[in-house]
Image (cartoon, rainbow, N blue to C red):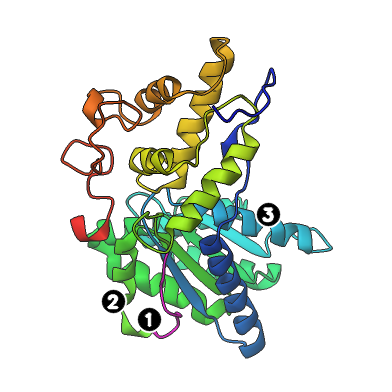
Amino acid sequence: MNLTPATGKTPRLSNHFITTPQIERTSARVYEVIDDTRASGKAKGLVICGPSGAGKSTMIKKIIKDRRIEIADGHEFKTIYMDIPSKPTTKSMGEAFLETLQDPFARKHGHSAEFKLLRIVGLIKSLGTELIIFDEVQHIVEYRRNTEETSKWIKYLMNHTGAAVILIGMRETQEILNNDQQLRRRFSATIDFDRFKISTPSANNFSSLLKTLETIIKVKSVSLTTSEMLQRFYYASYGLIDYLTKILDRAAFLVIKNKLEGITLEVLFQAFVDEVWSDAKDNRNPFSSQFNFRSLIGRNEPFYKVDHDQQ
């Protein structure tokens, strides 16, 4: 085994921000949209869409943290981040936005959706907000009853505040722009924030990611980056960084809890069962010697319908 030194305690990978070429490119585009909005005086937008677990929200939260550090006066609301409610209406979005701004009128009864929107516009202008980020935007598409109204709500916000807007969500998020050409003109080309793949140029990036994770884990471990292990981790995570970190965090925990020598295939087998798929048969657990090296994308398997063309 290629082992790294063991310690009594291991930091959680999920607490580390690990950059990748995709994250660097996307972050650069976000800052360009902010700069373009600032220079032109007209609100610009960007849609970032891709499968859950690819790291979109983690990247955006890092951008928010960095922007708050960069602002000398510690201005809390130069950037505003909000999760879209699961069944969004213009009123529920207004309430959620005002709550994000810590506004006492957020849940005030008797105030219409229009009143809340006007109040939001006034607050954004007075706060000098430059960037508004909406996450889980696919909820707008899923809750089709109010898609047109909520699209107009976002458009009004952009027109009357001059703030840059980032929309983040699953791939169906793109439908918001497809269904509203006026809104689409305000947005740059959509960024497809995809999972890692091992049959494309991103294979090297996947290998580099695992090498980075290997340096962070402070328990002994088999090499994570042999050709065979790269394939096993790919099938176990389907190239989604969230699942990679869950499996490795759990494996490190099991090593410490059970006072084991280090991370082995057997430990990874159990970590996969604990974190990804408890009902996996041996030939469908990527860390089993019986694994058949086929993607776990069948019905009732963990990554069913992850890809856009399967939806």
Residue topped by disc 2:
178
In this rendering, the answer to whether 225 lies above or below 124 is above
Between 27 and 88, the one nearer to me in the picture: 27
Q: Inspect this view and state whether residue 227 appears.
A: yes
How many residues crowd mark 3 within 10 Å: few (<14), some (14–19), many (20+)?
few
- Which numbered disc covers residue 65? 3
User: What whole-number distance in Å separates the C-alpha atoms at marks 1 and 3?
Assistant: 28 Å
Residue topped by disc 1:
184
Q: Is residue 19 left or right of residue 94?
A: right
Residue at 56% x, 55% y is 59
Q: Residue furthest front?
A: 1
Q: Which residues are magenta?
A: 185-192
Give how far across and how far down residue 171 sits, in percent.
32, 62
Give, as a three-letter code, the residue at label 1.
Arg
In this rendering, the answer to whether 207 lies above or below 189 is above
Q: Residue furthest bottom?
A: 40
Give how far across and how far down residue 13 sits, in percent.
58, 37
